[in-house]
Amino acid sequence: MKRIKTSILCIIIAIALMVSVFAVKQVKTADDTFQTDSSYITAENLALNKGKEKFKKLTDGNPSTGFKSLRKSNTAIDIDLENAKEINCIVLKEDGLNIKDFTILISEDGKTYSQIYHGDKIEYHRLCTFDAVTARYIRIFVNESDNFFRLKEIEVYNQPKVNSDDFRMTGYVLNSDFYEILQNDEIKDKHSAIKNMLESYHFSGLTHVNFYCGISFDENGNVFVGDSSGDLQKQKKELQYMVDCMREYGKKNLKITYVIASGSGNPAINTAMHDNKDVFIKNLISAANEFGFDGIDFDYEFPQSDYDYQVFGDFLVELKSHMLTDMNVKEDCILSCAFGTRDIHYPQKVIDAIDTVNMMTYDIFDQDGQHSSFWSCAVQGAKYLEKIGFSKEQINIGIPFYGTQVDALMEQYIYKYISGFDYYENTYTFNSYLDGSPTEVYFNSPAMVRDKTAYALLNEYGGIMVWHFSCDTDYASDYSLWKAAYTAAAQFGGAK
């Protein structure tokens, strides 16, 4: 195993094992205020009070009414906008969790239809985005449902751009991506190879990087760079080189934080953050200043007790106070944390000390045992963080560039290794790591990534976060997830 990469992989494995314990089917009784809320869409609902008589309750603007199907499959729902209109997104609202496959088609004459969207579930609220098209007739075709379904509303929009100047595109970047080049003796021009690696995932589009770079700590508050058994000076030089490369090939104002990973149950956490917090804070800030980082990101997702929460929360407040005065970047410093979307117990003073929450709206399983679906995970997760006191500006909605087995088994598969990409498909078959047998794996398709990015932007959340940067296929591909995210940001975002 390669140096540095070893420690990162160990951390990732530990986190995966920990998450497997806490991964749950998180589908709660939905709060109707955000089931039906489309206020983030500023355009006129072009379908309001339009459509055939039998479907009028789907366009009356009243979510308490709707359409109940008499079949579980092959059901067409037609809306007539009365005139041809340009549209670029549709919001669908289901009363329940029954629809498992649907298609959106459009027509100008009511005779010839073309498909513009395909999805696997609607749930209570689903934003469907697509390139602008002109249509008079909209057909929602439910291909499959596990029961008789009920739709509450169909809303059709031509949404204009909103201000996206401060919208964050954040990626977790691993130092192993660099070491695969630096430790490959067959690569002679390593600088060019690193440039090509970064560009293959459109690194220059990122506004923020959370860098898993092998910085760790012990219970005494000491902060270490790399593998303690290796050449410290060499590892520091390599780390600085990686940061310099990202500065060279990234945006002019790219913000880079380094990640401190703290697995749940690690006895060093509370000791370092409580008994030795002054030393720990000093060393954390010293590391940030030494390598020119803009901030510190804590990947400590699951404190286990009230005491854990108190220690970590008090530590974050004091750390942020010292960062503002002692970091080279002063008031521009960033304190960020990766959090799950349940059982968070922090007082408001802690919440206020955190600049950015990288919300882990993945490894959360919906009613079908599938992770990171649109409503069950992204929408509910973001609303949960708001409910406990975080502002929208603090929240990055997390998007996975990997898939997991259904039913919370937590084997994780990388998106770029899919065979036979489909723009709308979320489910693929892989050979299980455990025994080699075929296993169903759920991903976020380009369409899903595009919708989630648009949802975050239009809702005025701070941005999106991706775990992790290089799981994507090449940016030149039509199936690139990064391309889908940037497509949404360009379509619905713009300058002031």
Image (spheres, rainbow, N blue to C red):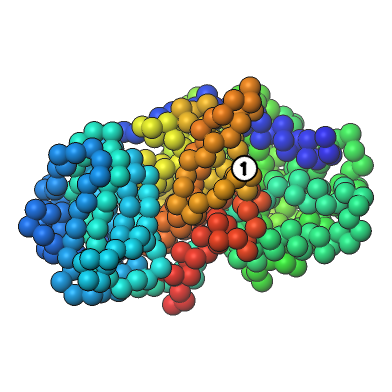
Q: Quadrant of residue 348?
A: top left
- Image coordinates of residue 153 in percent, x first then y, are 20, 53
Position of residue 346 measured from the top left corner of the image (x, y, whole percent): 45, 38
In front: 416, or 37? Answer: 416
Q: Name the residue under label 1.
A: 414
The answer to which of 398 and 349 lies nearer the viewer is 398
Residue 307 visible in the displayed image: no
State which quarter of the image contains the C terminus.
Answer: bottom left
Q: Which amino acid does label 1 sit on?
A: Ile
Q: Which residue lies furthest to the top in this view?
A: 435
- Which element type, helix, strand or loop, lies under badge 1? strand
**Residue depicted at 85% across the width and 35% down the height:** 228
Identify the residue at the far left of this view. Answer: 53
Q: Choose between 292 and 452: the one closer to the eye.
A: 452
At x 22%, y 51%, the residue is: 76
- Crowdedness near tag 1: few (<14), some (14–19) or many (≥20) residues, C-alpha within 10 Å: some
> Measured from the top left, where is residue 334 in percent x and y?
59, 55
Q: Where is residue 103 in the image (x, y as percent from the top left)?
A: 33, 52
Residue in the image at 27% along x and 66% along y:
112
